[in-house]
Amino acid sequence: MISYTSPDGRKVESVRVAVSGLALRATGYIVSTQDPAYGASYSIVVDAEGRTRRITVRSDDVSGERSLSLTRSQGGPWIAESVAGSSPLPALSDAVDVFVADSAFSASLPVRRLALHRTAGAEAEITVASISLPDLAVTPQVHRGRTESTTDDGALIVYSGPSGARTVVVDGEGLFVRTDGLIERVG
């Protein structure tokens, strides 16, 4: 079990992860008392090549409850399933990874798949299927990563996307540890 918290304690995330090589299964929970306050849960399945194959997200806030599943078969499009039905998402055709807003753990997915935590100077620009919370809107977003340094314990990566640039610390498995001033692992 891995847990994260913001410095003010108003946002927490807890995730159970089972790792086998690049493949993983993760089940997590996020609680935020920031405006808007919400709770969310997610389940992620990543294949042996590090590609996200399925994510299911549920959220609730004062506006109600929502659920969304994104599934991608090898070589196929992302398919969104919600109470409104099922539909392909061609705008996500370049996305291999998913990113859940406010989930520290989800930043680990492209780092692990691309082994950014293994080589200083490694760089990548990727498109992710970004899921906002609590509304579960899905959009393609470009994220960039550059590994500044590595040690036996992990790596320091400059990671940027629509929210700006941040320095991210990951452990030796490529799992998110902290972004100073925003969120950090506590367990």
Image (cartoon, rainbow, N blue to C red):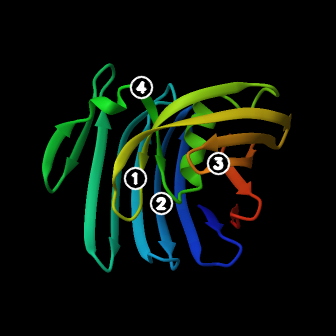
| Amino acid type of the residue tagged 1 in the rendering | Ser
Query: In front of the other: label 2 or label 3?
Result: 3
| Residue located at (51% from left, 74% from top) | 32
| Amino acid type of the residue tagged 3 in the rendering | Gly
For marks 4 and 2, give the CA distance: 25 Å
Q: Is residue 133 visible?
A: yes
Tag 1 near tag 2, CB within 8 Å: yes
Kindly state the secondary structure of the residue where label 4 is placed.
loop
Label 1: which residue? Answer: 43
Query: In front of the other: label 3 or label 4?
Result: 3
Tag 3 near tag 4, CB within 8 Å: no
Q: Is residue 117 visible?
A: no
For marks 4 and 1, give the CA distance: 21 Å
Label 4: which residue? Answer: 94
The residue furthest left is 85
Which comes before the other along the chain, label 2 or label 3? 2
| Residue located at (49% from left, 73% from top) | 31
Kindly state the secondary structure of the residue where label 3 is placed.
strand
Which comes before the other along the chain, label 3 or label 4? 4
Tag 2 near tag 3, CB within 8 Å: no
The location of residue 117, given as percent across then percent down, is: 73, 34
| Residue located at (12% from left, 48% from top) | 85
Q: Quadrant of residue 5?
A: bottom right
| Residue located at (54% from left, 29% from top) | 126
